[in-house]
Image (cartoon, rainbow, N blue to C red):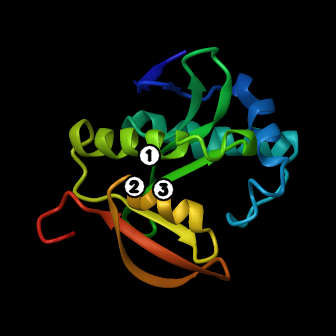
């Protein structure tokens, strides 16, 4: 198990193929996936996501990482930076079990990941997206230091797009 980051209450590690059930469980709650254009996934889809989307990003020292509580080693969701080659962007993303909403974990994780992107990866910018109706996710992006730049449509959904504020001339 490769640990990537730690915060006061959380630690991050790379997903492995042994984590199929974690992804299936996380995506099984329709409220968790309400704004992300995804739903429940089966084992074959979880394996595909791990093999084709999540794990390949790790070779670049980035990706979606499993997030755990330091206090009891409970898996609570994922957070990380993913490179989107088609847009030439580095995307901040997160997803947590509903029972952990409202505790500041998404904000704590996102702040740590943004700092990792700036200080370790030396990225010039990080973007984040949220459905215009997902007010809590918008607050997380803002608290993580990203600034609103535009509204648009992605995957048939109206979104707000944010960009890292650590670049000259932004924020």
* Secondary structure of the residue carrying numbered label 3: helix
Q: Quadrant of residue 165?
A: bottom left
Kindly identify which residue carries mark 1: 110
Residue 84 shows in the view = no
The residue located at (60%, 29%) in the rendering is 15
The x, y position of residue 142, in whole percent, is 40, 61
Which quadrant, please, contains the C terminus?
bottom left
In the image, 103: left or right of 19? Answer: left
Relative to 136, does residue 11 appear above or below in the rendering?
A: above
Residue at figure coordinates x 48%, y 61% from the top left: 139
Within 10 Å of the Cα at label 3, are there few (<14), some (14-19), or many (20+) other Cα atoms? many
Q: Nearer the viewer, residue 62 or 116?
A: 116
State left or right for residue 64 relative to residue 111: right
Q: Secondary structure at mark 2?
A: helix
Q: Do the residues under discs 1 and 2 have CB atoms within 8 angstroms?
A: yes
Question: What residue is shown at x 47% (from left), y 46% (from top)?
Answer: 107
Find out whether the residues at labels 1 and 3 contact each other: C-beta distance under 8 Å. Answer: yes
Q: Is residue 154 left or right of residue 112?
A: right
**Circles 3 and 2: CB distance less than 8 Å?**
yes
Please identify, in this view, whether the residue under mark 1 or under mark 2 is nearer the observer.
2
With respect to residue 149, does 38 lie above or below?
above
| Mark 2 burial class by Cα count in 10 Å: few <14, some 14-19, many 20+ | some
**Mark 3 lies on residue:** 140
Q: For the image shown, how many numbered marks are present on the structure?
A: 3
Residue 143's mark?
2
First reached walking from the N terminus: tag 1 or tag 2: 1
Disc 3 to disc 2, C-alpha distance = 5 Å
């Amino acid at each position: 198990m490769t640990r990537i980051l730690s915060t006061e209450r959380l630690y991050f590690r790379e997903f492995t193929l042994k984590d199929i059930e974690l992804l299936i469980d996380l995506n099984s709650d329709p409220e968790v996936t309400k704004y992300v254009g995804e739903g429940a996934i089966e084992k074959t889809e979880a394996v595909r996501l791990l093999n084709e989307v999540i794990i390949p990003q790790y070779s670049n020292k980035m990706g979606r990482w499993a997030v755990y509580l330091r206090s009891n080693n409970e898996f609570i969701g994922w957070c990380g930076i993913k490179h989107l080659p088609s847009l030439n962007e580095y995307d901040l993303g997160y997803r947590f079990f509903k029972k952990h909403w409202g505790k500041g974990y998404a904000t704590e994780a996102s702040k740590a990941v943004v700092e990792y992107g700036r200080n370790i990866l030396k990225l010039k910018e990080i973007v984040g997206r949220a459905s215009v109706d997902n007010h809590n996710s918008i607050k997380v992006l803002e608290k993580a230091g990203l600034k609103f730049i535009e509204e648009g449509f992605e995957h048939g959904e109206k979104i707000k797009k944010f960009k890292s504020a650590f670049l000259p001339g932004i924020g």
